[in-house]
Image (cartoon, rainbow, N blue to C red):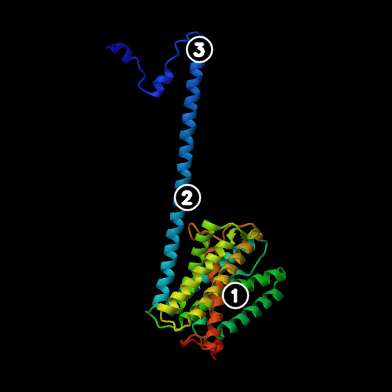
Amino acid sequence: MDNTRDSKKPTSRIDADSQLNPEETGSVGIDRQIEKLEIRRSLKELQRSAGNLMGQRVRGVTEKLLTRTLSGVVYAAIVLAALFVGKEATIVLIAGMGWLCCSEFFHICRMGGRMPNEPLGLVFSLIFPIIAYFGHVFPLVFSLLLIILCGLWYVLTPRANLADVAVTAFGPLYTSLSLSTVVLLRSTEPSFSIPWITLAVMLSVWANDSFAYLFGSKFGKHKLAPRISPNKSWEGFYGGLLGSMLVWFLIAVFGAIDMNPLFALLFGVTEGIFSVVGDLFESRIKRGVGLKDSGSIMPGHGGLLDRTDSMIFGTMAAFLLFQLAVLFSQVKLPIALPFGA
């Protein structure tokens, strides 16, 4: 058995590559062999770099998703804890959320060249949730007072223009007064208990966002509003409606709300539609001034207004529909009618 011949066999592909072809013993053959080796090594380095780049992208997406999830969980935990404790905790929560959202709204407007009276608007953003505690009529009274004070500021301030006045008044009405409907709904239920009404309203909005994302990611082909929000699709929209309807139906059947299941589905459809309207509304405001996010207070989400834009319109629609439901005896709960009727 020839051991000398076996010992000369290449032990790896690299060894095989590194051995010269005996037929190419001249300088041209050596150069050709070296060139082949360099090409192979370059390809391996390129593959290794591509693998590292792909790994970095996967890690980046994973870290971003994890950050977004943790941020959303903390946000949901704070909201649900305040709702469970009672209306006083809900007032503190909504006052803080209203103030932050109003501040971010004014920031967006400043990026668009507007100069709102921020102190005036921010003070009223704190007032609205507090006065909602005392009944439906007080938000109306203070809304009128806000308009009067904005008019007074316009008259006494030469630099103010009508657009600045409109932004100043609209900011707290859009962000804080609308969220105060959560306080009004929570006031109908006892403290330290499961707030079925408010819980249904909040979970419906969150389910709409989650189902819209899942359906849009999986089936999204037809753009819903490409000029305002290119990532939204009709498939995601219908998936979001399904999520909202499912929440209301389950709470009406298994929860403490004495509501006709068909009427519960109507609640889901209504809140689902207006949740999307709220999202698109804020997206168009940001797109008009060239901003992607309203702020950076919520890692992975952007600003608080980015997270609550759906809730703002969704809770308003649910509150108005609740008033009609009580009026026509579709919901049997001690909910106060508008303006204390």
Q: Position of residue 32 (x, y in %)?
A: 51, 16
Look at the image and tell me whether residue 276 can be seen.
yes
Residue 278: which numbered mark, if any?
A: none
Q: Earlier in the sequence, mark 1 or mark 3?
A: 3
Count of numbered marks: 3
Residue at the far left in the pictured view: 1
Task: Please name which of the two marks, 1 or 3, marks the residue nearer to the observer.
Answer: 3
**How far is the residue under mark 3 from the one under mark 2?**
48 Å
Image point (70%, 74%), residue name: 154
Which residue ends up furthest to the bottom in the rendered image?
A: 341
SS assignment at label 1: helix
325 and 123: which is toward the camera:
325
Quarter of the figure that contains the C terminus: bottom right
Using the image, determine if residue 75 lies above or below residue 321.
above
Instruction: Name the kind of residue labelled 3 in the image.
Output: Gly
Amino acid type, callout 2: Val
Mark 1 touches mark 3? (CB < 8 Å): no
Mark seen at residue 61: 2
On the image, the x and y values in percent for residue 222 come to: 61, 58
Q: Mark 3, mark 2: which one is toward the viewer?
A: 3
Q: Quadrant of the N terminus?
A: top left
- Whether the residues at callouts 1 and 2 have beta carbons within 8 Å, the answer is no
Query: Which mark is first along the chain, 2 or 3?
Result: 3
Query: Judging from the image, what secondary structure is the residue with disc 2 in?
Result: helix
User: Which labelled disc corresponds to residue 29?
Assistant: 3
| Disc number for residue 173 | 1
Residue at the spot 49% in from the left edge and 13% down from the top edge = 30
Does 99 appear above or below 296? Answer: below
The crowding category of the residue bearing disc 2, from other C-alpha atoms within 10 Å (few below 14, some 14 to 19, many at least 20), is few
On the image, which quarter does residue 294 sit in? bottom right
- Label 1 packing within 10 angstroms: few (<14), some (14-19), many (20+): many
Q: Quick check: 26 left or right of 162?
A: left
